[in-house]
Amino acid sequence: MQRFVKFKFLLILTTLFWNCSSDEEDCTKTITLLQTYVLGNQTYSYNRIQEVPCDFPESEDPIQIDPPILENFSFEVLNFSYTENSETNTSRFQFEIELNNPNDYDVVGVPILTVNVNGLETKNNYSNTASIPCNTIDANSNCILTFDQESSLDLGRINSIELVTVEYFLTN
């Protein structure tokens, strides 16, 4: 009987030894990844904490990522106009666009407008010169991006201008 118990004990011990993985296979570590992205002429960065296998190579170089975009974002154009005044030799570009954040969290970011000017599409950040820049939008709320600027016609004439789309990129 004692022999049987010893045999059973050795059998269980052997089974456990062969079936349990080594500590190296289960070894993980927590690293901090610096992620950056460029939006307009500004660079944004943040640290991302991630658990990885112990043999995962650590990089000190920042990782370039695409700018994060606000999910479920929508917009409504309330006013979008461009006018020229030949008497004062100036043009006036103005718009009001309602930016909607239907999410249950506040956001910090930058609205980027894609406009077609004389057949050329460009993406622009008008927040720096907007009277209401909408760099924050509360949860389940909206903000009216308001821009009104006069320029000299000496800088060039615009034959046609059209708003293509608006995107809201997160910066925090």
Image (spheres, rainbow, N blue to C red):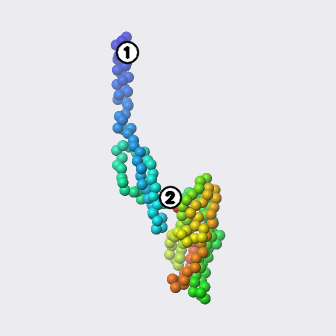
Q: Which residue is mark 1?
A: 5
Q: Nearer the viewer, residue 160 or 109?
A: 109
Amino acid at circle 2 = Pro
Query: Is 54 situated left or right of 47 in this image?
Result: left
Can residue 149 be spotted in the picture? yes
Q: Residue at x 51, y 83 (%)?
A: 155
Can residue 103 be spotted in the picture? no
Q: Residue at x 35, y 17 (%)?
A: 7
Residue 98, located in which quarter of the rendered image? bottom right
Amino acid at circle 1 = Val
Residue 68 is marked as: 2
Q: Nearer the viewer, residue 53 or 146?
A: 146
Q: Nearer the viewer, residue 41 or 27?
A: 41
Residue 12, located in which quarter of the rendered image? top left
Q: Which residue, as the protein is rendered here, is positioned at the far top?
A: 1
Q: Residue 140 at x, y = what percent?
A: 63, 56
Q: Residue at x 64, y 72 (%)?
A: 79
Upstream in sequence: badge 1 or badge 2: 1
